[in-house]
Image (tube, rainbow, N blue to C red):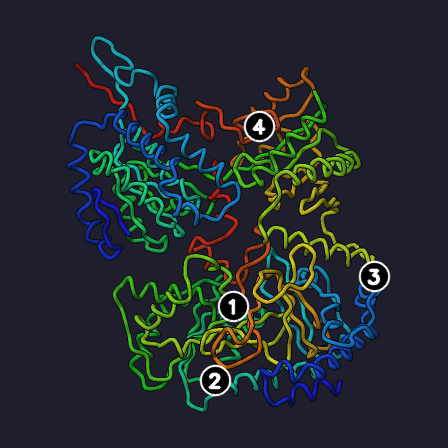
Amino acid sequence: MRSVSRLLRYKNIYDIKGSESLFVDAMRENCRFQYDNSEDYRKILDGMNFSPDDVKDIDGVARIPFLPTLFFKTHRITSYKSTKHLYKATSSGTNGKFSEIWFDLGSLWSAMIMSLKILKHWKLISARPCNYIVFGYQPKRSNKTAVSKTAFLTTLLAPALHRTYALKYSDGKYEPDLETVLEAIQKYSTKKAPVRFMGFPSYTFFVMQMMEERGISVKLPKNSKIMLAGGWKQFYKEAVDKKTFYELARKTLGVEEENIIEYYGAVEHPILYADCPNHHFHVPVYSRVIIRDVNTFEPLPNGQTGLVNLITPLYKATPLLSVMPDDLGILHDGCKCGCGIESPYLEIIGRVGLKDVKTCAAGAADLLNTNALSKVIEGGEK
Amino acid sequence: MILANGVVLETSEQNDLLNALPGKLNKTLMEEPLDPQIVIDAFDNLGKRIANGEFAELISSIEMSGKDEYIDLAVRMMSREYLEYKLKVELGEKKSELFESNRISCDRVPLGVLFHIAAGNMDALPVVSIAEGLLAGNINILKLPSVDNGLTIKAMEILLEFEPRLKDYIYIFDTPSSDVVAMKKMADMADGIVVWGGDEAVTAVRSLAKPGTRLIEWGHKLGFAYVSGYEDKETELQELAEHIMVTKQLLCSSCQVIYVDTDNFDEVKMFAEEFTNYLNKAAAKYPVDDIGAVAELSIKRRVQLYDDFIGGDYSSKDEVVFYGNNVSVTAVPDSELELSYMFGNVYVKPLPRTEITRVLRSKKEYLQTAGLICSPDVREELAMKILRSGVERVTRAGNMSFYFDGESHDGEFPLLRYTRLINIEK
């Protein structure tokens, strides 16, 4: 896959236009590889009357049949013999259903280069040791969910002095332990080393809320950062808007808005979307995003709400070239952001449906009473 | 924001107010009981002002389907006619002197202090809950839902402006559910806790309440239809389909599952296929406007299409889905009463009449409304069978969510639950 290597070497990581022909070539190569190596994928493309040779331009890329996240949750699909599988990522479960995504060595290498280039661009790699507060799961052999791994891996971006986990494993299940986190915050705030928060926005919010209610505020050391991943989905449209979050972070932790960095990504689409200074997820050269009509799946113009179709040629062991998570989103013109990056940016505004709303932070959502299902029924006039 | 004694306060004043509240409540409790006519006058006035569009701006910010119908219902539930009728039906015409002997007199009086937990985002629900509490003569402490848009406090301000005599009977807090300390304080002051919400909210409230505090739980319910023959097949199935599309299956009384009186799954599939046409027609009349619901169905459909291409069977439940335009009917071989995907996505399941009680009893906590479609000669027999299994209302299938004036709520009269009986020896 020569085009992928060239894409990974592409200098300006947000030059969507300049990298287009390279991207199309890489997509065609990937589509051909998946078609030749996965029987199920071939049957789907044949059924949809689509051939890898149809990927001639960016419109051809848009016509590649996408695989919904739901498909990965009910099917095990791979284009490599299991001996070549190196690493398995599992998505957070929805109603007990998990996606299993396999990675081969080449794919992992691509993922690493891509991540490093993006993190380097945003100057998130530091040699200065930090204290970490991980709002995620304590790593454990049996816990393969990608969120716990990313949360842990991100603590390697700067050397770790100490790590405190918000979700503790006891008696066979994970439980939030916010009191311990609060103690750690108070302890770390007296030290010189910067603190880095990593994980679900919801738990971060609970701790800050707890501090505010108890009248506790600290000033964390300079260069402390709050890094958020795992989704605002549970908050969408209500409860906490980002402004409230930033304000609370400034008030309780002494962390300014520019030091709050958010990521978007999915197991089925391992591309790191880091937010710009205006907190927007611009699309990097390694991927493209198409928003589709919820009824017809036709691509929608920028600015309209629809299903999110995420496209990347980086991965081989599983056909992840065009996937559709259960997210509803809007793609905005890059020029509307104002940060200077011209690549369009993705805004996630919610989840599809109402029944399968439980996600990795469901426990947190329940505490906040933002579970959409119960809202609908609570909302129901009786 | 907080509302106390007719004054709007900042959230930061919550704890000071909670500390002073027991004293305030005691003072009010010592006074003459509240006259229900004062309450009726005040709410009738409020309802009229809502109907006249006084809250148009706030109401326009509410996002929900069937909003107008809901507002209409809320206005009707505040009307003098409705409240007087409710008072009469639920507490009897003469509230006092229920019973009098030579030595003992008996009277019905307010419970005292009610703590309302309106856990949802249904914007008029907190107001309706307070109205019922006041009608029974109680002091009301209300915890707003986390997503309240300010409608409740605004409505109560207007109510109190019209009727200042109610100001010591209404306390509204915007305390988050996570503030357990404040929630516990409010619960401790209450004689009864009224909770609207799902299993999680109800369970949380149970752990909050002291033993002896009366719990009034308006939990979530699952509605279903039962089909065993017809009086007028076309009309009845059309009405059921329209009920599903009008309510979007969001109400406790909405139909989630249609049971067919058979143990033959082929008959279930045949019914499901036929009913899809009815649902399709109803959907054209009352379309689904929820983008998330449509999106979910589109994705499910796409995955099913891929399943067909691959040729494997990945479905764990042997379900057969029939799709219409943005709606679906799923034939399922089991008989479990469960929540559907809502928004016009209904389940059809087999349930032979001999099995009704066994199946329904396994979900007895969730039973409320059954819509019955059958031939006239078996209607009474089937209705009684369903009611004896724990269901509280059996209606015609098209009327499952119709509100009949004077009907009980989840098998009870709320005002009876919000009052208590006292005895005085002469």
Q: Residues within 10 Å of mark 2 (few under 14, many from 20)?
A: some
Instruction: Give B120 or B221, whichever is nearer the viewer.
Output: B120
Comparing marks 2 and 4, which lies closer to the viewer? 4
Say left or right for B395 vs B267: left
Residue A37 shows up from this direction: no
- Tell which subunit mark 2 falls on: A
Task: Report the residue marked by disc 1.
Answer: A230
Q: Quadrant of residue A69?
A: bottom right
- Tell which subunit mark 4 falls on: B
- Tell which subunit mark 3 falls on: A
Q: Residues within 10 Å of mark 4 (few under 14, many from 20)?
A: many
Task: Report the residue marked by disc 4.
Answer: B399
Q: Position of residue B266 (x, y in %)?
A: 80, 36
Task: State the SS at label 3.
Answer: helix
In the image, what residue type sits under mark 2?
A: Leu
Task: Report the residue marked by disc 3.
Answer: A47
Say left or right for A118 vs A370: right
In the image, what residue type sits under mark 3?
A: Gly
Q: Is residue A371 above or below residue A61?
A: above
Comparing marks 4 and 1, which lies closer to the viewer? 4
Task: State the SS at label 4.
Answer: helix
Q: Quadrant of residue A53?
A: bottom right
Looking at the image, is mark 3 or mark 1 earlier in the sequence?
A: 3
Q: Quadrant of residue A303?
A: bottom right
